[in-house]
Image (tube, grey):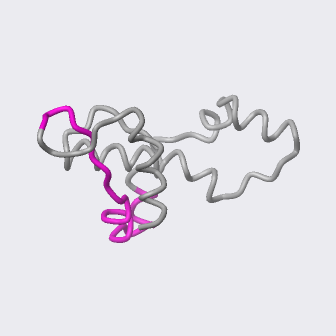
Amino acid sequence: AQNTAGISKVFEKFLTFGDAKPNDAIMVNNDDWLSQLNYLEFLRDYGTQFTINRMLSFESVKQRLARESPLSFLEFNYMILQAYDFLELARRYDVKLQLG
């Protein structure tokens, strides 16, 4: 709840939160779908759509590796989870843009 409140404050400067207008922003917690996720099934179903080569092509990853900064397995999986978040947002809320 504290994390959500902090994120909301940042985006309130740019967005209107609510449900009165079609373009109002919504704040949701991805734990609603991630906590129900079977990780092995998830990797089997979606992990094949993401290549290590593609991840390594991103400038942020290149910079981390160039600085010899450790890149954790969790960070490496972040791209897949972020894509899955957008998929669920599109399915549940017909979202066109995701921030945060």
Could you say which quadrant of the image residue 40 lies in? bottom left
- Pinpoint residue 75: horizontal percent, then vertical percent: 63, 53
Let me know if residue 29 is in the magenta part. Answer: yes
User: At x 83% / y 48%, what residue is drawn?
Assistant: 69
Task: Report the span colored magenta.
Answer: 21-44
Q: Is residue 68 left or right of residue 96?
A: right
Quadrant location, the N terminus? bottom left
User: At x 21% / y 45%, what residue is drawn?
Assistant: 18
- Pinpoint residue 35: horizontal percent, then vertical percent: 37, 70
- Pinpoint residue 43: horizontal percent, then vertical percent: 46, 58
Q: Is residue 93 left or right of residue 61?
A: left
Please name whichever residue, 79 or 89, is drawn nearer the observer in this view of the structure. 89
- Pinpoint residue 25: horizontal percent, then vertical percent: 27, 40
Q: Is residue 31 left or right of residue 53?
A: left
Please name whichever residue, 55 or 13, is drawn nearer the observer in this view of the structure. 13
Q: Is residue 87 above or below residue 96?
A: below
Q: Is residue 80 left or right of residue 14?
A: right
User: At x 34% / y 35%, what residue is drawn?
Assistant: 15
